[in-house]
Image (cartoon, grey):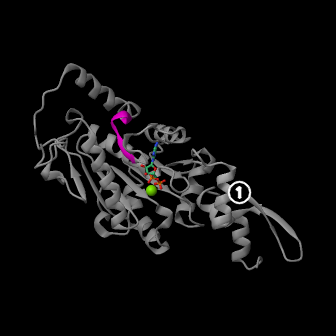
Amino acid sequence: MWQKTAELRGHLEEIEITKEQMDEYVKCSKDIFYFSKYFYILSDEGEIPIKLREYQDRIVKMLVAKYYDKNNDIRNNRIIMMGRQCGKTTIATLYILWYALFNNDKTIAVLANKEDQAKEIMLRIRSAILKLPLWLQQGINPDRGGWSKESIGFDNGTKIFCAASGSSAIRGKSVDLMLVDEFAFLPEEEAKDFIKSVFPTQSGRKDAMMILISTPHGMNEFYNIWMKAISGASSYVPAKIQWYEIPGRDEAWKKRMIRDFGIQMFQQEYACLTGEHKITVRSEEGIELTEPISKLYELWMDGFLR
Ligand SMILES: Nc1ncnc2c1ncn2[C@@H]1O[C@H](COP(=O)(O)OP(=O)(O)O)[C@@H](O)[C@H]1O
Ligand SMILES: [Mg+2]
């Protein structure tokens, strides 16, 4: 028991484990999908083991797969674009917890735009740990971060900590797995600064992994990384989830969202349209132009479209 929490394994606490549990532990360690049956989330029906949706399954597969480029260089980073409220952060927490439990001496950073959002992700990971049977847990290690709102330390030497993406806490730190949640919503200056100060040490490491997950938000740094990733010329492997892949989101839902929030908001934040998509614009004189969004953006910036 860790301090007064009966559901949590204490520091160096020995527990009895049956042969079946040992087999189960090994299966979980080898297979994140198998492990997911022990991973609880807060849903509309209360705390339940996650049942991965088809598109979540696809994302988890791409998180664990190994990718290489033409030169046989590993593509160890991921960029995932999805609409709002479709279980992005949830998948990231599943992957982080699985990675943390079964890898020794790793450092994992959970970053979000505001410290409170980062702490909320940590809270989800902590709630999921409390639901694990003790034989599947690691003892809590006070020397690796213990058990707090900001950090979790395990007896296997692995530590998870959280911070705001813009905070100095992560500058110059070497991290094995870094999640940056909703990166597209980081203010432009902070995003630029992040790329300048964190990417060179982090993105360049072949034995580390960076996961950027976000809803798109205009032609910003997230967009730039995305465009490079889809061209195949970067260490980022891209994945995109379409709005209609989410249960309950059909044409009627789309109509309602567009009525309430407008087409622009829908296309960007739910349909995840990016620069390569062609759209048609019509001038007041009735002249129509069909071009990729990125091209129209350039024309607009150059003053050709008003
Ligand atoms: N597979 C799933 N089954 C049921 N509920 C889910 C599933 N995945 C996520 N959720 C729930 O959906 C809600 C939104 O998930 P979240 O990960 O916060 O989405 P996002 O980060 O995309 O906004 C949360 O309450 C989460 O527990
Ligand atoms: Mg989220």
Residue occupying image coordinates x 38% and y 51%: 205
Point out residue 119 in the picture as x, y percentages from the top left corner: 31, 60
Looking at the image, residue 26 sits to the left or right of residue 222; the answer is left
Q: Is 295 or 234 nearer to us in this picture?
A: 295
Is residue 279 in the magenta section?
no
The reply to whether the residue tagged 1 has its Cβ within 8 angstroms of ligand 1 is no
Q: Which residue is mark 1?
A: 277
Lateral position of residue 58 relative to residue 199, left or right: right
Write the start and end of the magenta stretch as one range: 36-42
Residue name at image x 27 percent, y 22 percent: 23
Which of 60 and 16 lies nearest the eye of the viewer? 16
Give the vertical position of 224 relative to 35 (above or below): below
- Can residue 29 be seen? yes
Check disc 1 and give the amino acid type: His
Q: Badge 1, how many Cα within 10 Å: few under 14, some, many 20+?
A: few
Q: Position of residue 100 (x, y in %)?
A: 29, 43
Query: Which image quadrant for residue 270?
Result: bottom right
Residue 172, image x, y percentages: 30, 63
Question: Is 132 situated above or below 244?
Answer: above
Give the SS element for disc 1. loop
In the displayed image of the protein, which residue is found farthest to the front? 45
Quarter of the image that includes the N terminus: top left
Q: From this viewpoint, which residue is outermost toward the top?
A: 19
Q: Which residue: 47% across, 72% down?
A: 187
Q: Is residue 303 above or below residue 184?
A: below
- The reply, left or right, for residue 254 in relation to residue 87 is right
Instruction: State yes or no: residue 39 in magenta.
Output: yes
Let me know if residue 109 appears in the view: no
Q: Report how many numbered discs are placed on residues in the image.
A: 1
The percent position of residue 221, horizontal first and vertical second, equals 53, 65
Q: Quadrant of the C terminus?
A: bottom right
Q: Is residue 276 left or right of residue 96?
A: right
